[in-house]
Image (tube, rainbow, N blue to C red):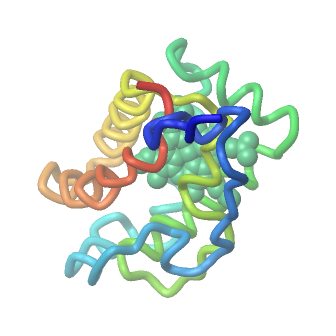
Amino acid sequence: APEPAPAASAAAADAPALVPIPGGPEAAGVRGPAPEGLYQALGEKAGIAALMGDMVDRALKDPRIGPMFENSFKQMRPQALKDSLAAQICVLTGGPCEYEGTDMKYAHAQLKIDKAQFNALVEVLQDAMDARGIPFTQQNRLLALLAPMHRDIITVR
Ligand code: HEM
């Protein structure tokens, strides 16, 4: 049989089994040094936890992506996802946290996320940051850390 195309969805039946990268900076998506001051600008651990809690609550209410989160919450507590996201953002922004989830490719492999859904979550995050009064320049620094993850998260072209 011919090899599957490299761009084939990770969830495709004939794709090689995906091995999770469990925990640590690599799983969190760290690619370099954290931008100076970003962790503080987001309000440190408590501010980041509140931001991620609000982002997930807003995502649930968004008709474009809410159903995907609803579906995951049949298996997992919303608070567990909020905690994992908060740990990831803490690590990415240079805070004193440990990320214990899996890497972004593995975490989203089954979800069939397309570009529009990825952009919808970015919008939801921007709204959550606006609501907390996080300055625009700091918002953009966080978004710049997350943007490259689209390659691992979007599996539907
Ligand atoms: C840069 C963008 C994104 C980041 C940084 C991110 C981050 C994460 C993290 C850290 C987890 C938890 C992994 C674990 O604990 O092992 C997760 C899971 C999840 N993400 Fe994302 N995500 C992103 C984009 C998206 C998008 C666009 C969607 C849907 C529209 C989405 C839906 C979900 C869902 C539903 C889960 C739970 C998966 C499950 O059921 O196990 N994510 N994400």
Residue 121 coordinates in the image, percent (x, y): 43, 33
Question: What residue lies at 60% left-to-right and 22% top-to-bottom?
Answer: 66
Please say if 99 is above or below 42. Answer: below
* Quadrant of the rendering where the N terminus is positioned: top right
Q: 77 and 104: which one is in front?
A: 104
Please say if 122 is above or below 33. Answer: above
Q: 81 and 23: which one is in front?
A: 23
Can the viewer see residue 54 in this picture? Answer: no
Residue extending farthest front: 1
Q: On the picture, is 20 further left or further right than 125? A: right
Question: What residue lies at 28% left-to-right and 80% top-to-bottom?
Answer: 32
Q: 157 and 15: which one is in front?
A: 15
Q: On the picture, is 104 further left or further right than 12? A: left
Question: What residue lies at 38% left-to-right and 47% top-to-bottom?
Answer: 151
Residue 46 coordinates in the image, percent (x, y): 52, 68
Residue extending farthest right: 75
* Quadrant of the rendering where the C terminus is positioned: top left
Q: On the picture, is 92 further left or further right than 74? A: left
Residue 144 coordinates in the image, percent (x, y): 23, 56
Can the viewer see residue 79 in this picture? Answer: yes
Question: What residue lies at 28% left-to-right and 58% top-to-bottom?
Answer: 142
Residue extending farthest bottom: 96
Residue extending farthest left: 137
